[in-house]
Amino acid sequence: ARVIMACRSVDKAEEAAKDIQKACEGKENLGEIVVLQLDLSSLESVREFARKILEAEERVDLLINNAGVMMCPESRTVDGYETQFGTNHLGHFLLTLLLMPKIIKSAPARIVTVSSIGHT
């Protein structure tokens, strides 16, 4: 498998990827971890990330929307949306929308959106 870690902080993601690889040393058929930058609070960042995926990846078998912010100080995204709404909802929606054609072509692919009780 090829797992793409889409993270706001590339440095932290690369550290996490190294930890995963170290924990899996000596095991077979581990696949590959790729770290790419994605800031869901920036629609431009979402578009750029999706462009890279659409150009580089033959398939998208699974998209897990699992990023978010909660109870952040009152602020706005670079696009002018309230930060929690822009990051947790609009960023995921745009990413899913942009990757949807590739996901459909990769059938039977799946989209999983993770949330918390904080959203209810």
Image (cartoon, rainbow, N blue to C red):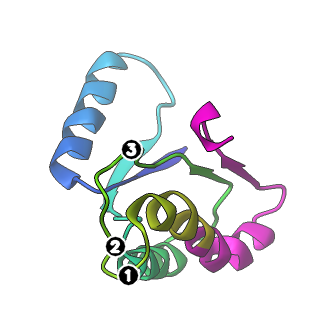
Q: Nearer the viewer, residue 14 or 116?
A: 116
Image position of 30 (left or right of 90) = left
Query: Which residue is disc 2 drawn over?
Result: 77
Query: Which residue is disc 3 drawn over?
Result: 71
* Residue at 40 percent of width and 48 percent of height: 69
- Tell me which segment is drawn in magenta: 94-120
Q: Nearer the viewer, residue 52 or 116?
A: 116
Can you name the residue that lies furthest to the front here?
Answer: 74
109 part of magenta stretch: yes
| Callout 1 amino acid | Gly
Can you name the residue that lies furthest to the left here?
Answer: 11
Residue 78 to residue 95: above or below: below
* Residue at 34 percent of width and 65 percent of height: 39
Distance of mark 3 from mark 1, alpha carbons?
18 Å
User: Quick one: label 3, few (<14), some, or many (20+) residues within 10 Å?
Assistant: few
Give yes or no for contact between labels 1 and 2 (Cβ–Cβ under 8 Å): yes
Query: Which residue is disc 1 drawn over?
Result: 80
